[in-house]
């Protein structure tokens, strides 16, 4: 569903460079601030195991490797440090979706107050 997000180029005067602004369709915009459940491939962002992203694709074909667009990845902000999660582990998380149309160097989608969720307890 997030793949239906479009992007428009704009000049970011704060960073003195061209960037993209997310144009969220109504079905995504209405989810802003709502608690959602989402499943994807976990990607570590740092070596400490504190910062993670969730991708629609495994690392080898994700946004960071040039294999997908920015609509395919979201930042994860956990309520508690999650410890080590292996790269490409397929996980489901519960959290509040925050849309960031002009995130600067961040993600266009963020999941905050993230908790692991097991759909099959």
Image (cartoon, rainbow, N blue to C red):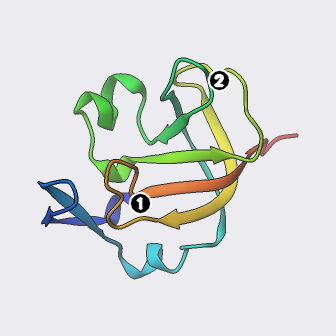
Q: Please name the residue shown 62% across and 47% down the image.
A: 77
The residue nearer to you, when weighing 105 against 78, is 105
Check whether the beta carbons of the residues at disc 1 and disc 2 lie within 8 A of each other: no
Point 13% across, 55% down: residue = 16
Q: In the picture provided, is 120 more to the left or to the right than 113?
A: right
Q: Residue at x 17, y 56 (%)?
A: 19
- Mark 1 or mark 2: whose residue is earlier in sequence: 1
In the picture, which quadrant includes the C terminus? Answer: top right
Q: Which residue is mark 1?
A: 2
**Quick one: label 1, few (<14), some, or many (20+) residues within 10 Å?**
some
Query: Splitting the image into 4 quarters, where does residue 89 fall?
Result: top right
Q: Nearer the viewer, mark 1 or mark 2?
A: 2
* Viewer-side residue, 115 vs 120: 115
Residue at 41% x, 82% y: name it: 26
Query: In the displayed structure, does residue 107 sit left or right of residue 117?
Result: left
Relative image position of residue 2 (x, y in whole percent)? 41, 60
């Amino acid at each position: 569903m997030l793949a239906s997000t479009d992007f428009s180029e704009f000049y970011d005067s704060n960073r003195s460079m061209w960037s993209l602004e997310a144009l969220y369709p109504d079905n995504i915009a209405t989810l802003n601030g709502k608690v959602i459940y989402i499943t994807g491939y976990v990607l570590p962002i740092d070596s400490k195991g504190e910062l993670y992203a969730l991708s629609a694709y495994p690392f080898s074909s994700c946004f960071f490797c040039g294999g997908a667009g920015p609509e395919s990845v979201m930042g994860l902000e956990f309520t508690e440090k999650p410890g080590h999660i292996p790269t490409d582990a397929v996980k489901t998380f519960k959290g509040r979706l925050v849309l960031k149309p002009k995130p600067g160097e961040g993600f266009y989608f963020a999941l905050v107050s993230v908790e692991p969720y097991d759909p099959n307890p």
